[in-house]
Amino acid sequence: MVAVLTLLTVLLPLAARAAGDPVPLPHLRPDHFVSPLRATTAAIAPDPVAPVYSPNSRFTRDEQIALARINAYFNSFSTMEGQFIQFGPTGDQSEGVFFMSRPGKIRFHYAAPSRLDVIADGSTVAIEDGRANTQQLYPLSKTPLRYLLTDRIDLTSDQLVDSVREEPDLISVLIVEKSALIEGKLALIFDRKTYELRQWIVTDAQGLNTSVAIYNVTTGKTPDPGLFRIQVKTSQNR
C-alpha cells in the first residue's frame, strides 16, 4: 500500500508551495551512481548557446547557457531505457527498470517484492498492482510525466521554468504549474558536466518529496511497442 501511495504522489496533480521555495536537493545516490551513465547521446558542442542569450530574460547568462545545453541534450533523443530507484517521502525505497519512447510512452517495471507497473501509452497512465489485481487510470496530460514525455520540451523558456539551481555536480531545473486544473512542482536534476537527466523530484501538498533516480541509462534503442500497451480491465474507470 505504501508503494501505491508513493506512485500516486508522483503521478497525480500536486499542490504547489510558494513560488520562492528553493528547489529540493536530491537524495544521496547509491555508490554505483558514481559511475558515468552509459548514454549514447551525441556529444553536445562546447558552446552551442551564444546566439540564444537574451539580456531580457530573468535568468542570468550562465543560467541561460546551462538551460540551453540541457535543452539540447534532452531533445537529442526520443528513446531511453535503464534502471531506477524511487525514494518515498517516508524513507521507503523501491527499484526496477524503465523504458521510454517519446512522445508519450513510458514503462516502469518494479522489481520484487513489488508487483507494480506504471505504463503510459501516449494518452493514458495506468498504475497496475499485480498483487492486489487493481488498475488505476489517469490522463497523461494531468500528470508530471507529460514533461518528460513531450515530443520537444523548451527548458529555455522562463514561462515554463521557474528557477535554476546549480550545485557542484548537479543542475536543478524547477517547473511550477498553476492552472485551473493543475498546480504542482517538478524538479528535474541534470548532471552538470554531461547535462544528462539523473533524477526528478515531485513535491506534494504537504511539502514532502518523492524522487526517482535513474542510472545505467542508454538512449537510441528501439523498445518493444508492447511494453507501452495498456490492457484496460472492464471493471476499471478513468
Image (cartoon, rainbow, N blue to C red):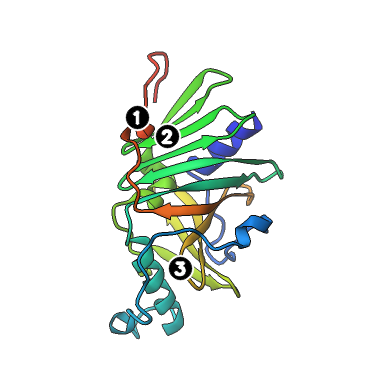
Q: Are marks 1 and 3 in contact (CB under 8 Å)?
A: no
Vertical placement of 139 versus 71: above or below?
above
**What mark, if any, has residue 229 been given in the picture?**
1
Q: Which residue is mark 3?
A: 195
Vertical placement of 152 versus 192: above or below?
above
Disc 1 residue type?
A: Arg
Of 96 and 91, which appears nearest the observer?
Answer: 96
Rendering coords of residue 130 (x, y %): 54, 22
Q: Which residue is mark 2?
A: 119
Going 37% across and 79% down the picture, which residue do you hit?
A: 57
Rendering coords of residue 232 (x, y %): 37, 21
Rendering coords of residue 131 (x, y %): 58, 20
Mark 1 or mark 2: name the one nearer the start of the chain: 2
Indicate the secondary structure of the residue bearing disc 2.
strand
Going 34% across and 31% down the picture, which residue do you hit?
A: 226
Q: Is residue 58 visible?
A: no
Rendering coords of residue 23 (x, y %): 57, 64
Q: Residue furthest right?
A: 91
Left or right of 229: which side holds 98? right
Q: Circle 3: is it few (<14), some (14-19), or many (20+) Cα within 10 Å?
A: many
Q: Circle 1: is it few (<14), some (14-19), or many (20+) Cα within 10 Å?
A: some
Indicate the secondary structure of the residue bearing disc 1.
loop
In the picture, the quarter occupied by the N terminus is: top right
Disc 2 residue type?
A: Ile
Of 193 and 127, which appears nearest the observer?
Answer: 193
Q: CA distance from mark 1 to mark 2?
A: 8 Å
Going 54% across and 30% down the picture, which residue do you hit?
A: 116
Q: Are marks 1 and 2 in contact (CB under 8 Å)?
A: yes
Vertical placement of 24 versus 80: above or below?
below
Disc 3 residue type?
A: Tyr
**What mark, if any, has residue 63 been given in the picture?**
none
